[in-house]
Image: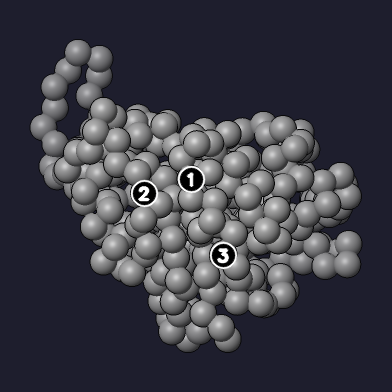
């Protein structure tokens, strides 16, 4: 199998995880138990996942001119990811996700920071990198204009595109038609399609109608049930591995990294989906989205 060349255009965050016994009420101060600083963001997570599998990866996006930005860029570079497409903005903070975590619940506050300045101009400046790739991975944690610009550059050059429509958002038809593969989870597909499916027959009908409308392949991740796609118009569901989950953060990113890796390597969707499901299943057995990303050898053994 050839070493695939993947470009990821998307977000980079520092996740600040504060653990405590219970959530404070309004106006209250409580003692926290621990704090962790963990590089994240869907774009960076998927770039790390693809690199861990052995792909040649380039990242396009923006960080702030602060310590978090430097740490994120250094982490990506240490994994062999090409960071030439990362712009450092001295007048913006790096994007953050502050996660208040207890044994029973969590609350999350996201500040886009530099991710909000990842615009059409930034992406277009690195369009040549996209045109030389085997596959482009995009998500929705940066402005839609950047997603559209990246996918347009890829489409013009015949580079396959995978759009992970997360966080959930209603998308214009022109963006959806730029994608070769779209990978929502169940909630995201319900929002995008207006369909709430309660049986496999309803899933099959809704997915078939979607593919006929937009002309791309739809791959729906379904949590512990695995992943569903259509083969010659008939629904196929690949079950997740029976594992004991430790941290489900980043499972969807591990899936997209695995799917992108296989498709960029020349595999069929029928071969790529089971591989991606195994990658996602393994990712939840370790703490941290990026640290949980499996290697190629681990996925093959599974």
Model colouring:
one colour
Residue where numbered disc 1 is placed: 125
Q: Is label 3 in a helix, a strand or a loop? A: loop
Name which residue lies at 70% across and 40% down. Answer: 175
Horizontally, residue 124 falls left or right of residue 290, namely right
Horizontally, residue 147 falls left or right of residue 248, namely right
Q: Is label 2 in a helix, a strand or a loop? A: strand
Residue where numbered disc 2 is placed: 86
Numbered label tally: 3
Name which residue lies at 52% across and 70% down. Answer: 5
Q: Position of residue 112 (x, y in %)?
A: 38, 32
Name which residue lies at 72% across and 75% down. Answer: 268
**2 vs 22, nearest the viewer:** 2
Instruction: Choose the circle earlier in sequence order: 2 or 1.
Output: 2
On screen, residue 240 above or below 297? above
For the residue carrying disc 3, how many other residues have a C-alpha within 10 Å: few (<14), some (14-19), or many (20+)?
many
**Marks 2 and 1, how far apart in space?**
11 Å
Residue where numbered disc 3 is placed: 133
Instruction: Choose the circle earlier in sequence order: 1 or 3.
Output: 1
Name which residue lies at 41% across and 45% down. Answer: 61
Horizontally, residue 227 falls left or right of residue 231, namely left
**Marks 1 and 3, how far apart in space?**
15 Å
Q: Residue 277: which numbered mark, if any?
A: none
On screen, residue 301 above or below 269? below
Q: Is residue 282 visible?
A: no
Q: Is label 1 in a helix, a strand or a loop? A: loop
Q: Position of residue 41 (x, y in %)?
A: 39, 46
For the residue carrying disc 1, how many other residues have a C-alpha within 10 Å: few (<14), some (14-19), or many (20+)?
few
Quadrant of the snapshot with the N terminus? bottom right
Q: Position of residue 166 (x, y in %)?
A: 55, 42
Q: Position of residue 186 (x, y in %)?
A: 65, 46
Horizontally, residue 180 falls left or right of residue 30, namely right
């Amino acid at each position: 199998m050839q070493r695939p060349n993947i470009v990821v255009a998307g977000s980079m965050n520092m996740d600040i995880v504060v653990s405590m016994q219970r959530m404070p009420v309004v106006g209250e101060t409580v003692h926290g138990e621990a704090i962790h600083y963990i590089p994240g963001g869907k774009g960076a997570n998927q770039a790390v996942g693809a690199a861990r599998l052995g792909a040649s990866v380039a990242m396009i996006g923006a960080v702030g001119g602060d310590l978090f930005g430097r740490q994120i860029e250094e982490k990506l570079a240490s994994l062999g990811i090409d960071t030439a497409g990362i712009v450092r903005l001295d007048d913006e903070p790096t994007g953050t996700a502050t996660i208040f975590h207890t044994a029973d619940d969590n609350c999350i506050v996201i500040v886009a920071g530099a991710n909000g300045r990842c615009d059409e101009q930034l992406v277009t400046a690195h369009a040549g990198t996209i045109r030389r790739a085997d596959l482009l991975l995009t998500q929705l944690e940066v402005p839609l204009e950047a997603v559209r610009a990246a996918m347009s550059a890829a489409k013009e050059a015949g580079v396959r595109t995978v759009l992970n429509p997360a966080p959930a958002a209603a998308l214009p038809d022109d963006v959806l038609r730029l994608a070769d593969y779209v990978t929502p989870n169940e909630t995201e597909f319900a929002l995008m399609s207006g369909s709430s499916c309660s049986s496999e027959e309803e899933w099959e009908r809704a997915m078939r109608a979607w593919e006929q409308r937009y002309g791309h392949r739809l791959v729906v991740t379904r949590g512990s049930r695995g992943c569903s796609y259509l083969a010659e118009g008939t629904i196929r569901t690949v079950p997740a591995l029976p594992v004991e989950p430790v941290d489900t953060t980043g499972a969807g990113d591990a899936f997209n990294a695995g799917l992108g890796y296989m498709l960029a390597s020349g595999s069929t969707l029928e071969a790529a989906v089971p591989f991606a499901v195994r990658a996602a299943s393994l990712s939840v057995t370790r703490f941290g989205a990026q640290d949980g990303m499996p290697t190629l050898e681990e996925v093959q053994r599974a």
